[in-house]
Amino acid sequence: MGRVVTGSDPVLRYRGAVSLQHGPHGTAPWRLPHEEARLHLPEGGIGRAAMPAGVRVTLRTDSRALTCHYRADPAPRLNGPQEQPFLDVVLDGLRTRSVLLRADGGDASFEVELPGRAALVELWLPTYHQFRLRSLVVDEGAAVTRDDRRRPRWVHYGSSISQGRGASSPSRAWPALVAELASLDLTSVALGAACCLQPMTARLMRDLPADLLTACVGINIQALGSHGPDALTSALVGFVRTVRDGHPDTPFAVMSTIIAPDREDVPGPSGLTVRKCRERIRAAVELLRAHGDPNVHCVDGLDVFGPDQAHLLLEPEGMDRLHPGPEGHPVFAERFLAALRRSLCVPVPA
């Protein structure tokens, strides 16, 4: 039978989760307080916060095998290509397998081989499908201990570009790759089609532990018309100042939208183009710096993923080109990390 570790066992860590919802069918990690989901997303789209993008279940064990019992729900209908429900198995920092999950809401399981010595096991959960861990089963008599690593905490906010759309699997999304390259402990509060500088998200980031704060904003604001030109500047200033109530000196990098070839000069519902969004975001950051916040930095999205990288965007039929594809995510990660190092938000390696 083996040793059963339930999804709610405190020996497991759900790194990147903001809250855990325990129920009869397992433990579901959320990326905001699940009891307050309606306060964060009153207009709908609550399911996005239950999608465990960037969340990984971690433990240490000397077992020779591990069986994962889970439930994965179908992803809500989304614009663009349907994301596959992959889960990545990472052993001692090395990706060993990507598992295609069964995502029909029923009980399912998969088994993976382990080295049979003390090893760090990380299960990177699917990006666009809700997931509940029922249990992990290891060899009878195997040791299971808690992952006690301490790394700088990184909290990132953004749209579906940041949630990981277009990546080949969860640990290959650009935020996951940045975290791997810079040895950061990632918490992603990126919500597809819901990155509009909501005050509740600012309060959440204020209250989360963080050694690095980043945000990529603009594309949802332009597409949805949530802010006009002046309102965008004011909203971003207020958003950063709210986060600053809990993190007065933490490095905070605000990145504007990456290249959006089909929207650069097309006005959205509020009249903003993507190009104008970038100008407003830079103006807001400069205003904050001029008023005594030297640790907030503006990263131009075109410096990270600009015209020279446009060929790496997904080209879904009948849809705008907005998201890096599988080959684009590693490029995005390297260039974003370089931008953080230029602004000294992340130490430059010796």
Image: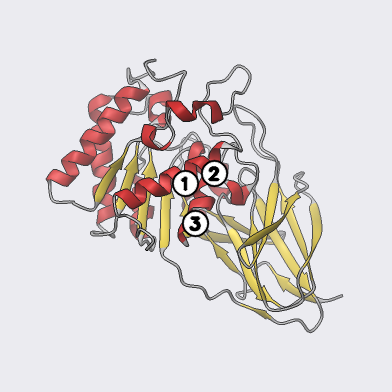
Q: Position of residue 201 (x, y in %)?
A: 38, 47
SS class of the residue under badge 3? helix
**Displayed quadrant of residue 346:** bottom left
- N-term mark: 2 or 3: 3
Q: Position of residue 104 (x, y in %)?
A: 77, 44
Residue farthest right in this picture: 1
Q: Position of residue 35 (x, y in %)?
A: 50, 55
Residue count near mark 2 (Cα–Cα under 10 Å), binned few <14, some 14–19, many ≥20: many
Identify whether 118 is placed above or below 77. below
- Say which residue label 2 marks: 330
Judging depth in this view, the residue of 88 and 69 nearest the camera is 88
- Residue type, label 3: Leu
Q: Which mark is residue 307?
A: none
Q: Are marks 1 and 2 in contact (CB under 8 Å)?
A: yes
Residue at x 54% of width, y 34% of height? 324
* Quadrant showing the C terminus: bottom left
Residue farthest left in this picture: 291
Residue 157 at least partly seen:
no
Identify whether 216 is placed above or below 9. above
In the picture, measured across the screen, residue 142 lies left or right of residue 53, that is right
- Residue type, label 2: Pro
Residue 18 at least partly seen:
yes
SS class of the residue under badge 2? helix
Judging depth in this view, the residue of 229 and 49 nearest the camera is 229
Residue farthest bottom in this picture: 141
- Say which residue label 3 marks: 181
